[in-house]
Image: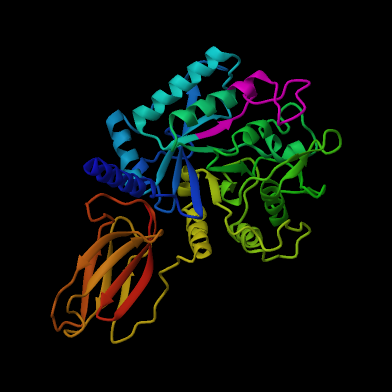
Amino acid sequence: MKKLFFLMLFLAVVISILTGQTLPDKILVGYWHNWGYTPNSLLLTEIPEAYDVINIAFATATVPFGSTMQFNPDPGIYPNLDDFIADISYLQNLEKKVVISIGGANDPVMLLNSTDVQNFVTSISGIIDTYGFNGIDIDLEGGSISLDTGDNDFRYPTTPKIVNLIDAITQLTDLYPDLMLTTAPETAYVQGGYSTYAGIWGAYLPFIHALRDHWTYVHVQHYNTGSMYGRDGVLYDPPTPDFHVAMADMLMAGFNVDVWVGNIFFEPLAPEQVAIGLPASTSAAGSGFTAPDVVHTALDYIVLGTSFGGQYQLSNPDGYADFRGLMTWSINWDVDNNLEFSNAHRPYLNDLMGVSAFEENIPNNGISISNYPNPFNPSTTISFSLTAKNAQDAKLEIFNIRGQKIKTFLINSSTDEPFNSIIWNGTDDAGKPVSSGIYYYKLKAGKTEISKKMLLLK
């Protein structure tokens, strides 16, 4: 019995360690295009390090408005299925999460009866098992989710396609207890329910409400939208800081639904269940692109309670410290736009977590360091000055933007030469190419540490 007890205890510890590899407090989520056009094609291994969650777009119905789902990697990007699966594992080994997104704007899904529910659950389970996805993202549009006439209380939905979708997702969360569950509705489907609860307006609310204990996070799309009411009854225009603050606050403070008729209160989600969806560039969406400094102005208020003097007054004056982060459409558009989105927002989110561990250091003790070219592709020369004394046991380390060490060079020289250099060819310690993005190189020599930034552009 004692042996069995200690075996069970050991397994529990192992499971705890494995499941303890969680996402950062502040995440950056991006969609990856499973097609080789508009604006580019990327291998999963080419995704910038800045992203914590990659949403694979999309799993679709086998027929329009169908319930059986399918997913195959684009053969123009991944002619070999095993390579796609291996690259998912590669990202997961970097502690990233890879999620299959369901639907999209052009591929409606419809669950009208119990047979449809079973078709959906069985096919999505097969996709998860085949590729090893960490979860599912619900991005249904085009009539997939809308309210029937007479369905007027989000707490007790009667529309079959909504009731059945709730049933199907509940079954999947039961089958996969550690399943990540996220959703990316447009504002009309969520905050739009404040003024009107009919058709698509507010149609995601029964879905979000019924599964509120299962959502990892909800990232409403703050783009391709017109003016929307805040919970204060005032219309706010995108893409202003007031708009982003007001829309986020509705989910974290709750709001009244169908305020002039039903006026039923939608209970808030936990702040860690709320993120904001933004376009990566002006080309990525029809409207709603927000310059990074404007986004940060809004987030300073949302997270820290630092007001910018706008019209909207945050429900919690101290802010929501656990607010989860940002989503973008899309990683491909970010790469197309020279990584403006991830290069601006990953350091900002790191600062919020207090993990901007690498600062531009002032050279001291006779040591200096620099790299050229910067930005670079495919390699850069990192030059440094060391004396015979401080070169003993010196090493050069390279970190990604999340602070994870990816490469170490042991110097261990006692040369009298004043300058030394190392060429980094953009690979990790395993020899695998790393993705585009910001990296930090740190020289450690004795008690002295000097670090600087460099940018890999592919």
- In the picture as drawn, the residue positioned furthest to the front comes out as 1
Do we see residue 113 in this rendering?
Answer: yes
- In the picture as drawn, the residue positioned furthest to the right comes out as 260
Q: Is residue 413 left or right of residue 342?
A: left
Residue 426 point in image, percent of width and height: 29, 56
**What residue appears at the point 51 percent right and 29 percent down from the top-left corner?**
102
Residue 449 point in image, percent of width and height: 32, 77
Is 76 colored magenta in this rendering?
no
Could you say which quadrant of the image residue 106 lies in? top right
* Residues in magenta, as a range: 137-164
Could you say which quadrant of the image residue 277 lies in? top right
User: Considering only vertical position in the picture, is 212 above or below 423?
Assistant: above
Closer to the camera, 45 or 115? 115
Residue 435 point in image, percent of width and height: 35, 51
Q: Is the magenta region chiefly helix, strand or loop?
A: loop
Image quarter in which the N terminus is found? top left
Do we see residue 62 in this rendering?
Answer: no
**What residue appears at the point 65 percent right and 35 percent down from the top-left corner?**
209
User: Considering only vertical position in the picture, is 376 above or below 89?
Assistant: below
Q: Is residue 78 left or right of residue 274?
A: left
Is 146 colored magenta in this rendering?
yes
Instruction: Tally the marks.
Output: 0
Please say which color scheme the image uses: rainbow
Closer to the camera, 315 or 328? 315
Closer to the camera, 132 or 397? 132
User: Considering only vertical position in the picture, is 40 above or below 275?
Assistant: above
**What residue appears at the point 13 percent right and 80 percent down from the top-left corner?**
414
Residue 320 point in image, percent of width and height: 63, 57
**What residue appears at the point 40 percent right and 59 percent down from the top-left corner?**
401
